[in-house]
Image (tube, rainbow, N blue to C red):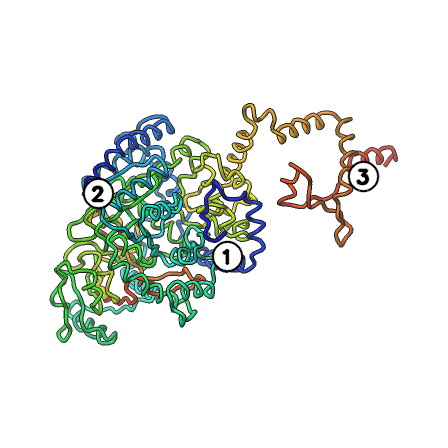
Amino acid sequence: MGTEMMVATNSGTARAEVLRRIRVAKGGTSDTETAGTAWSRVAREYRRSAVLEPKSLLELLEDRLRDYDAHVVRVGYCDVADAVAKMLAARGKRRLVVPAGLAAEWLPAGFEFVRDDGMSSTALDAFDGVMTGSTVAIAVTGTVILQNVPGQGRRAVTLVPDYHLCIVNAADVVETIPQAMDRLHETAKLTTTFFSGPSATADIEMTRIKGVHGPRHLDVILIV
Amino acid sequence: MSGVALDPKTSPVFPMAAKAALGDTQMRKNVRHATDVIQSKRARVVGEMPDWQQLREAGRQIRQHTMEHLDFYLEQFEENCTRAGGVVHWARDAEEAKRIVTALVKASGSDEVIKIKSMTTEEIHLNDALAAAGIHAYETDLAELIIQLGEDQPSHIVVPALHKNRQQIREIFQRKMNLPELGETPQDLADAARMFLREKFLRVKTGVSGANFLIAETGGVCIVESEGNGRMCLTLPETLITIVGIDKVLPRFQDLEVVLQLLPRSATGERMNPYNSIWTGVKEGDGPRAFHVVLMDNARTEILADKEGRQTLNCIRCGACQNACPVYRQTGGQAYGSVYAGPIGAILTPQLQEMHYAQSLPFASSLCGACYEVCPVKINIPEVLIHLRNKVVKQNTAGIAGLFDVEAGAMKAMAMIFKSERRFRAAQRLGRIAETPLVRKDGRGVGWIGWLPGMLGGWTQVRDLQEMPEETFRDWWEKRRTNGN
């Protein structure tokens, strides 16, 4: 801690100097009011709202998720547990970690679901996969957004296991990124993860390769 | 060039480095393939967006607005990040940034760090500084791993190893990971990297990252990535140190809605990259227990002070200008002698050197404007290139040195010649005699000059010159009049 404090103190002079240079460079000091007024004048003529019917919206999301190699099914609320059982059986997964607060009625019998209580990365690595809910999904980009709330949990849980089964409520599907950011605004300070398909890279000859470091497989259950 | 850091202070001038690069046909083939693929993907997903131009304009305005109020937004970020449990440090230059990061890593009790791909840490050669302090840095991005294990240098902002093909990568992995049986499909290579790095992700206690965006309104930090190695480095270690240029701040959380539409489509031609992470300070039980942000100037305020150069700071590091640039596509990235290559490198690098080094880079362009057209935040790169060319010339002819500057002297002599018809005609006659030993005829009997002596060589270094015509226009015109035609 001693070294960290010393580093912080030295930074005081640097802070004053960098801020001084900025103010000299742009000729003055900005405050909440001038910055706020100028910010509100930024032209935002891009698309912020939806144009699609609810039915086409879900179709678009499914299409975009599949484009990223995710497997997607659509079910009613009462059939989630059945769908989970089918997907896990098809993937050959038996033992999953789940965050605290995940709806108990989504968990089918015959599989082992272990609640995350802050286990180590090594412990997480030993699971077949993870199952979570979600906060928002964006149709245009095929993106699902997780936050640190009950049912979605901390970031390591959806990162270390090799397989992710994610439940998305149709009510949480929006069309555009601006709509999603509007929804997230109130909880902007929570840790947030956007994912669009499984982990991927195109670093080798621009060939898209799945699963370099994150989960290699992604299944999505869409509750309609 | 392998193994030698890309440092504008020591790199050869662009025309020399480019000439060497042009001889590497394998590298040129790899670069052409990669940039062709990204460009066509980019064009397709940008074409899907009916409001692309409006988004670009909003992006430009947000970035410009941020620069106009940079002091306010940095202080606001610092306040909100600190309130959320982060520790903010300020660094005036690269040396100071490296000292801070090294001290923080040592204080974390680790002599190893896992790193996310970061242009900022490349810019300041952080890995060398860490190594000098006995700290081993593991690059975890697949491309950066290829570069690190191959003792190579990056050649692209987004796809740093695009100059290597799969056989070359396989050879590096076989040697450095001790996997003689390794296959050569991209999947084999990615699997090898996953095995190699997973152990490090689970073991190493300190992470070092850059950042794509800082959010002043919330104190949050945003990283945009593909592989999940970023999430690993941000989430699993006990201490996270994020180093970021002061230009990376965004005013409000809502502004992400613009840059998150512009960046992935421009950078990799995807509607959205696989992962984005946003975190604010420290969160009990989720991610690192200690979080540090180092806000680094390193000549960015110099750029801010230059009215015409300032738009350079709007860059969101998507690399679209590189892929579109006819010069970059021929030479690859390493000829630029800097981690920032292509058109953005040609304007950013010399300015980050306060115009003392990399002065040849503003001239490394055909000014065709392709970079401006694809830039998601509408940086007028050709305009800045011309501005910087002007600056380079002025700088080299300023003061006492200017009086003895050969080029400036020659320009003055030229002005004298052009002012007088008699002197101009004499110069033309003299030129025809002087060029004789330098002219080589091509297959069609046209004479070309491929080399000029001394300072004039600057012209012929990058282009051939046609020999002077037998008859000048003036001579022809006068003859025509006397003939009464």
Crowding at dot 1, Cα within 10 Å, few <14 / some 14-19 / many 20+, comes out as many
Kind of residue at badge 2: Gly
Please tell me in which quadrant of the rendered image residue B405 appears. top right
Counting other residues with Cα less than 10 Å from the Cα at mark 3, is it few (<14), some (14-19), or many (20 or more)? few
Q: Tell us which disc is closer to us: 2 or 3.
A: 2
Q: Position of residue B338 (x, y in %)?
A: 46, 45
Q: Amino acid at mark 3?
A: Glu
Q: Which residue is mark 3?
A: B471
Q: Quadrant of the C terminus of chain B?
A: top right
Residue B86 disc label: 2
Query: Real-space Cα distance between discs 2 and 3?
Result: 75 Å
Q: Nearer the viewer, residue B359 or B421?
A: B359
Residue in the image at 58% along x and 26% along y: B402
**Are discs 2 and 3 both within one chain?**
yes
Query: Is residue B327 positioned above or below B468 on the image?
Result: below
Provide the chain ID for the residue under circle 3: B
| Residue tagged 1 | B31
Residue kind at label 1, given as amino acid type: Val
Residue B37 position in % (x across, y down): 47, 59
- Furthest residue toward right: B483
When the figure is inspected, residue B41 is found, relative to residue B456, above or below; the finding is: below
- Lower sequence index among marks 1 and 2: 1
Q: Earlier in the sequence, mark 2 or mark 3?
A: 2
Q: Can residue A185 be seen in this snapshot? A: no
Dot 1 lies on which element?
helix
Same chain shared by disc 1 and disc 2: yes
Q: In this view of the protein, can residue B20 be seen by the observer?
A: yes
Kindly state the secondary structure of the residue where label 3 is placed: loop
Specify whether B481 is left or right of B405.
Answer: right
